[in-house]
Amino acid sequence: MSRYLFFSAFSFCCLINSALGADAPVATPTPTPSQPIKVAVIDRPPFAMKDKDGEWTGLCVELWENIASELNIPFEYHETDLEHIVSEIADGKFDIAIGEIGVSAEREREVDFTQSFLSFPSAVALNRQRGTALMTGFFSEMSQHGVMSVVYVMLGTLMVFSLLLWLVERGVHSSHFGGKPIHGFGSALWFAAVTMTTVGYGDKTPQTPLGRFLAFLWMFFGILLVSAFTGAFASSLTVSRLNSDVTRLSDLSRYRTGVLEGSLGHGALSAMGITVDTFKTPEQGMSALAEGQIGAFVTSEATLRYLNHFKYGDRFEVVQLPTTKVSFAMAARQNFPLLREINIALVAETTRLEWENDVQRWLGPPPGSGN
């Protein structure tokens, strides 16, 4: 009887253990691919670029190689361009793509994306105005908004009143408006100027009734002229500031603007009806800006920071466009088996304390940092 109970208990335990073992999940590591995966890379500094020896470097290349080393993924690079990258990944020509690849809903329909590793607003590079160029622009704005017309009217009426006052008062009191014509007219001009500006020193005063009547009219007319000048000048400064600020994509309608062919910015500006000049590479666009062929160049802030700082010595003003935002990620073919492990490693890499320093090392200082 005891032997029967022993075997019954043993059989029951084996049955329970078998049942539990069947339900317990078994972690199976993702196998390392036997063949190198095909990594498409876009030559777009500072994300990816070739050095003089033909080796790939850049922020994205460094990030990918750290991930591949951690996961022990063999790979081989294949150079391509941004215009064809999505279709080539979707067709399975490549397994994954790295470089300046912005995430969009249209691209998401065709390929899978990793976690975003950078996110920036779009930005525009503008020529800085300095020295004589700044003064020329200032007087141009004043002329366009009627300020100079008011100045010419003020000077003309000042001269006419001074001449009339001198003709009326020249024979009355030599110490005020008399003496030589140049001295008398100069005194009348001085009186007209200090009266119009409401300074009123009182060192020169008309003596005749007609002269005082002219002075009375001039006082009121002078106030009107000064008020008109003040209003025109303030309005011109306000409009000039509004015209020089770029805070959204629609503001670029005031400029001849360059964009990258096939970029997200190209599509957005075209949708707004803004005519743009297209360029194959950011280097071409910045070169056109430097030569004055365009007035503004739009692409990602990361690219503009890199080129402006490392190639042009911070010559241009880089302005963020807060109403736009571009997230950068790696693109992978759909159902790519290594995507989850790559995502985990990517998050680990980009949450390190040193990640921001790595970004600034490749991109240069952020706009407005003064560096």
Image (cartoon, grey):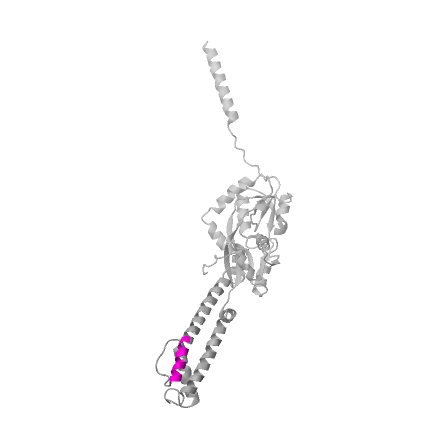
Q: Quadrant of residue 203?
A: bottom left
Residue 278 locus on image (x, y percent):
61, 58
Is 214 above or below relative to 51?
below
**Would residue 224 be found to the left or right of residue 106 on screen?**
left
Q: Report the residue at 64% width, 46% height from top.
A: 88
Q: Does residue 268 show up? A: yes
Determine if residue 81 is in view.
no
**Rendered view: 340 above or below 213:** above
Residue placed farthest to the top in the image?
Answer: 1
> Seen from this angle, which residue lies furthest left?
202
Q: How many marks?
A: 0
Report x, y in % for residue 219: 40, 77
Residue 342: percent from the left, percent from the top? 54, 42
Q: Does 218 lie within the magenta span?
A: yes
Identify the main secondary structure in magenta.
helix
The residue lying at 51 percent from left, 26 percent from top is: 23
> Which residue appears at 46% of the width and 66% of the height?
235
Q: Is residue 127 above or below residue 79?
A: below
Depth order, front residue of 232/135: 232
**x, y percent for residue 80:** 63, 50
Q: Quadrant of residue 181?
A: bottom left
Q: Is 126 or 311 nearer to us in this picture?
A: 126
User: 333 or 17, which is in the foreground?
Assistant: 333
Is residue 179 highlighted in magenta?
no
In percent of the image, x 46 and y 79: which residue is there? 157
The residue closer to the viewer here, 32 or 366, is: 366
Q: Which residues are magenta?
A: 209-220
